[in-house]
Image (cartoon, grey):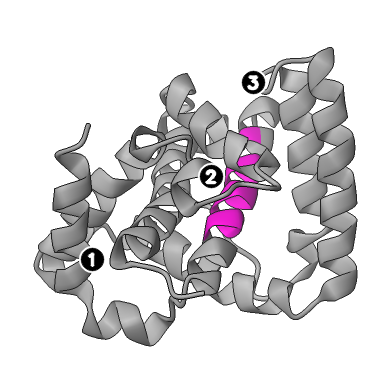
Amino acid sequence: MKHSRRDLTLALAGVFQAAFLVKQIANTGMANSAVIEASLETLFKFDAESVEDVYAGVAGAGSGLRELKKQFGSARGQRDVEITRYVISMLVLEKKLSANKVMLDQMASTLENIKSGLDYFSLMHENTVLKLGQLYKDTISNLNPRIIVNGEQQHLSNENNASRIRALLLAGLRSAILWRQCGGSRWSILFNRKKYENESTLLLREL
């Protein structure tokens, strides 16, 4: 199935949104809870009918679209190196994850179990986030190269923050898989930065 530039941009924005939130939490210990929730919700959209449905509408990837537009619209020396590194790392790990059917099946099964528990604990409850973080540790952390998150040690050493960061990296990988399924590739980023920037501008006008 052929996907549009809109689909590609929304999915890549999901990766940027996760990277942006990871950086915020690692450096300040805080991030917008509504945006975190929007990213984590994508992990449970197993049967979404469209890319937009994965994000519950354009607004669900709004922060990521703003970050994508800023990064792609800036001169090389003005781009956020940390966010770029997280995005590239997630795109690299996505290829390794997608080739590992055993790990994918393990993740799908665990996410189904976590979803069944949402009747008792909300998505943002620390128990749910802890389980998502543990899933990342049990799976993605075993792939190389591992994503090294930089930030303030006082925030990184806080277990709640560490769980949120891992859960968000998981969500970022979910978006990376979706982006790849839509036809995305690292070459497409290299040669189509302006197209992504222009499409993000159009999508942001809908917010």
Q: Secondary structure at mark 2?
A: helix
Q: Residue 5 lies in what quarter of the image?
A: bottom left
Q: Earlier in the sequence, mark 1 or mark 3?
A: 3
User: Type of residue at label 3?
Assistant: Met
Q: Earlier in the sequence, mark 1 or mark 2?
A: 2
Q: Earlier in the sequence, mark 2 or mark 3?
A: 2
Q: Could you tell whether 207 is left or right of 77 in the image?
A: right
Percent coordinates x, y for residue 163 in the rendering:
69, 35
Q: Which mark is residue 196?
A: 1
Pick the residue in front: 109 or 70. Answer: 109
The answer to if 130 sits in the magenta stretch is no
Report the Cα–Cα distance between label 1 and label 2.
19 Å
Q: Could you tell whether 89 is left or right of 70 in the image?
A: right
Q: Which residues are magenta?
A: 164-175
The residue located at (68%, 47%) in the rendering is 47
Residue position for label 3:
124
Report the Cα–Cα distance between label 2 and label 3.
18 Å
For residue 152, say whether it is visible.
yes
The kind of secondary structure the magenta stretch mainly shows is helix
The answer to whether mark 1 and mark 2 are in CB contact below 8 A is no
Q: Which mark is residue 54?
A: 2
Q: Could you tell whether 117 is left or right of 38 in the image?
A: right
User: Type of residue at label 1?
Assistant: Tyr
Q: Which mark is residue 205?
A: none
The local crowd at label 3, few if under 14, some if 14 to 19, many if 20 or more residues have their Cα within 10 Å, is some
The answer to whether mark 1 and mark 3 are in CB contact below 8 A is no
Q: Could you tell whether 171 is left or right of 132 in the image?
A: left
User: Type of residue at label 2?
Assistant: Val
The residue located at (33%, 60%) in the rendering is 9
The answer to if 170 sits in the magenta stretch is yes
Percent coordinates x, y for residue 35 in the rendering:
44, 29
The local crowd at label 1, few if under 14, some if 14 to 19, many if 20 or more residues have their Cα within 10 Å, is many
